[in-house]
Amino acid sequence: MPFVVSQGVLESVHQYQTATIPVGGSIMLADGLAQDYATIWRTQPQVRTVVSFLARNIAQLGIHVYRRMSDVDRVRITDHPVGELLSKPNGFTTRYRLIEALVSDLAIYDNAVLAKVDTLGLVRLDPRYVTPISANQFTVETYRYRGTTGYRDLPAEQVIHFRGYNPEDGRWGCSPMETLRRTLSEEYQAGQYREQLWRNGARLMGYLKRPLEAPEWGEAARDRFRRSWQAQYTGTGAKAGGTPILEDGMDFVPASVTPEAAQYIEARKLTREEVAAAYHIPLPMVGILDHATFSNIQEQHKNLYQDTLGPWLTMMTEELHLQLLGDFEDSQDIYLEFNLAEKLRGSFEEQAAQLQTATGAPWMTRNEARARVNLPQLDGGDELVTPLNVLTGGQASPTDSAPEPKTVLATAMRLLEGVAE
């Protein structure tokens, strides 16, 4: 099938007047209170728990560089410039900290931006201060980085931009915080309720009843009392949750919700469940163990690096291939890969049993075993100790060829009978 439509034709279909994409974002948590995404991460423990879980588990994985030799063969390269760059991005950031910040930015903003500096380094740019500038809906020509003293425009070739899917604009991601807006607002309101309840001993909810024989209120007096009451005893007022002083024979008719009915613990657990679900994280991985068992936790831990973190790792490596690897001369048949196998190998006991069964013989030397427990090498310890009855094509273990006890007893009895004759 021929490719007949040029990119320029498609770009001309949708032109932008302002040429800039709105960035940043905040969530209205209460009347008159909006918080940006960074503040939500800092103040809402459920969000921080889930985001930190993702960032820390991905950051601990090493990034290896390979050269593809054929369809079935590859060689790991330890001295390639791209590997050295990722292992030490710059003079003040380690690989772990860079990846942790990158994943955190993706989880919070659905965008992460790295600048390529002229000293062969990578520097993280805060997504809150980055504005992509573009005249079409497909590509970004310039990234504007704002600061306290002005701004600097960076060409797209000097930037690595990681982003998620946005149905309204494919050039800039859409934060998961927008999806969790209602959940986070409810969590904030519930937190305010709990804080005032414990600080003031009680938080009264209900209505005021004024007797008929009370002095008549004018409109101005009624409005003044209502404003005074709301300022002191509702919302974030200084005396919210305290004991009000009433006048003119007024009664307060409570209509409160008991702590049992409010279900604080269940509500907080539900918030963490919804936040974890938004990031596709198994609940036991973030401390929700209601229906957890040893076997399903073990399986979910394996699935974590396949179903949960797998798409993140694939996206990150492909963006590095697209936006970074081409800057190096030696990039033919070079590709990057997170060291995911280290997390999927299982315990040492499981590996030992599988390898011995697969090879049919001992597979580790004494010095290799001593190195695993930080012991020095021994002379002659680099040779495999192979029992005489464990040969190529033979048994995998000396005990596999041992006769059954009944067979040993029968043989001994026949020998004794022969001696007696």
Image (cartoon, grey):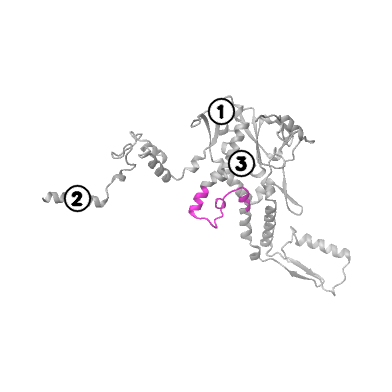
Determine the image quadrant of residue 141: top right
Task: Point out residue 221 in the picture as x, y percentages from the top left corner.
Answer: 86, 65
Q: Is residue 248 magenta?
A: no
The disc label shown at residue 81, or none:
1
Alpha-carbon distance for marks 1 and 2?
A: 70 Å
- The quarter of the image holding the N terminus is top right
Residue, x 75% and y 61% (percent of image)?
234
Q: Is residue 286 magenta?
A: yes
Q: Identify residue type, mark 3.
A: Val
Residue, x 85% and y 65% (percent of image)?
222
First along the sequence among labels 1 and 2: 1
The disc label shown at residue 234, or none:
none
Alpha-carbon distance for marks 1 and 3?
A: 23 Å
Q: Secondary structure at mark 2?
A: helix
- Which residue was labeled with disc 2? 412
Whether tag 3 and tag 2 are in contact, CB under 8 A, the answer is: no
First along the sequence among labels 3 and 2: 3
Q: Residues within 10 Å of mark 3 (few under 14, many from 20)?
A: many
Depth check, front residue: 303 or 56? 303
- Residue sitting at the far bottom: 213
Determine the image quadrant of residue 122: top right
Task: Point out residue 305 in the picture as x, y percentages from the top left corner.
Answer: 54, 44
Q: Residues within 10 Å of mark 2 (few under 14, many from 20)?
A: few
- Which residue was labeled with disc 3? 103
Depth check, front residue: 154 or 334? 334
Q: Residues within 10 Å of mark 1 (few under 14, many from 20)?
A: some
Between tags 3 and 2, which lies in front?
2
Q: Which residues are magenta?
A: 274-301
Q: Is residue 245 something that shows in the picture?
A: no
Whether tag 1 and tag 2 are in contact, CB under 8 A, the answer is: no
Residue, x 75% and y 70% (percent of image)?
253
Task: Point out residue 421 in the picture as x, y percentages from the top left corner.
Answer: 10, 50
